[in-house]
Amino acid sequence: MDDVVSNADAVVEGSLKWSFLTGDDLPELADLREAIDYFDDPIEYRDLASLRRDFERDVHLDGFLATVGRDRGGTVVAYAWIHPSVSPELRGHLWLDVGVHPAARHRRIGRRLIDWCVNRAGEWHDRASGDEPLWLGYLVDEKFVGLRGALGEAGFTPQRWYFDAHLRFEEHEVPAPPAVPGVRLVHYDPTFSEPVRLAHNAIHGVLPGAKPYTRADWEWSLGETGERPEWSWVALGPDDVVVGYALNTMYADDGSAEGWTTRLGVLKPWRHRGIGLALIISSMHSFRDAGLDGAGLGVDTGDPDSATRLLDRCGFAIQDRVVLCVRSGNG
């Protein structure tokens, strides 16, 4: 790529001095991230170690997908970084990340950083990704209204919301699971592994930035998360077809043990019938009966308000939400 990329391609706007990111810039970039994180209090903090991991992963791209901007004193006060997906099946998927020091904001540098990312991603995609369609994603804290607005101006739209929810049994009664006509809930066992995998792929494997599980990867992942069949549940429809599932494990921290739902899903034709609520409440009963202190789950949804109302009914406390904003194509 050296013959088609010049240092001028690193320039975002005229008030700062721009250059492509190098390994020597990483300590200064870590200092900038520390200042940004202190001011913004994001859900995910970045440190030098995580920046180095990203740089080493992306180094085969020669660094031409990341730029840093310095002020007159030579201090790094802004950056943009485009991360290609690590999955070979998603070669056209690129994840964006931009940041501006709080003292340098309100000059629309952030908006221009997003534009730079979009343009550089399109140029890289044209050279490197063949026929794979271009997909740009940005994970942003929902509370960052300004950044979300700038992404919207650049053609990004919110598609998925991610957040965690927790509940302690000493503070909440566990209600009885609701009965769902035509559906029965049974404990998970290994004979359900394949139909649950297929259901999971139909629900989550088609989402932006996701890929379906192969059978081997699925079995490996179940072992990695330490699924507990005796705490997990499967919803069966007519002819005992799997229409929903809740796979559960346990996390222990500081003397407290929490049951955790690692995978939860209901097939689209069966939604809005109370199956998700029944699966969550049945899981809560399993956790409480096992002597655990509480329940928790991570939510991945395109309808955050409905998901929040469902969890509110069970007494869960919702943590800060992250929004996946997406822009497809070069236009």
Image: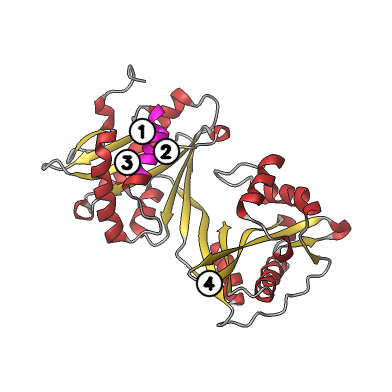
Residue 80 - label: 3
Number of the front mark, 2 or 4: 4
Say which quarter of the image contains residue 242. bottom right
Give the distance between the C-alpha atoms of the residues marked 3 and 2, in whole angstroms: 10 Å
Where does residue 250 sit, x and y in percent of width and height? 60, 64
Where does residue 49 sit, x and y in percent of width and height? 35, 45
Residue 83 - label: 2
Residue 139 - label: none
Residue 256 - label: 4
Give the distance between the C-alpha atoms of the residues marked 2 and 4, in whole angstroms: 37 Å
Query: Looking at this view, is 284 or 305 the one in front?
Result: 284
- The tag earlier along the polypeptide, 4 or 1, is 1
Q: Kindly check if marks 2 and 1 are in contact, taking CB atoms under 8 A apart as contact.
A: yes
Circle 1 is placed at which residue position?
Answer: 65
Q: Which residues are magenta?
A: 51-60
10 Å crowding of disc 2: few (<14), some (14-19), many (20+): many
What main secondary structure does the magenta stretch of the protein show? helix
Give the distance between the C-alpha atoms of the residues marked 4 and 1, in whole angstroms: 43 Å
Give the distance between the C-alpha atoms of the residues marked 2 and 1, in whole angstroms: 8 Å
Q: Kindly check if marks 3 and 2 are in contact, taking CB atoms under 8 A apart as contact.
A: no
Colour treatment of the image = secondary structure
Q: Quadrant of the N terminus?
A: top left
Number of the front mark, 3 or 4: 4
Give the distance between the C-alpha atoms of the residues marked 1 and 3, in whole angstroms: 8 Å
Check if residue 55 falls in the magenta segment. Answer: yes
Where does residue 24 sit, x and y in percent of width and height? 25, 35
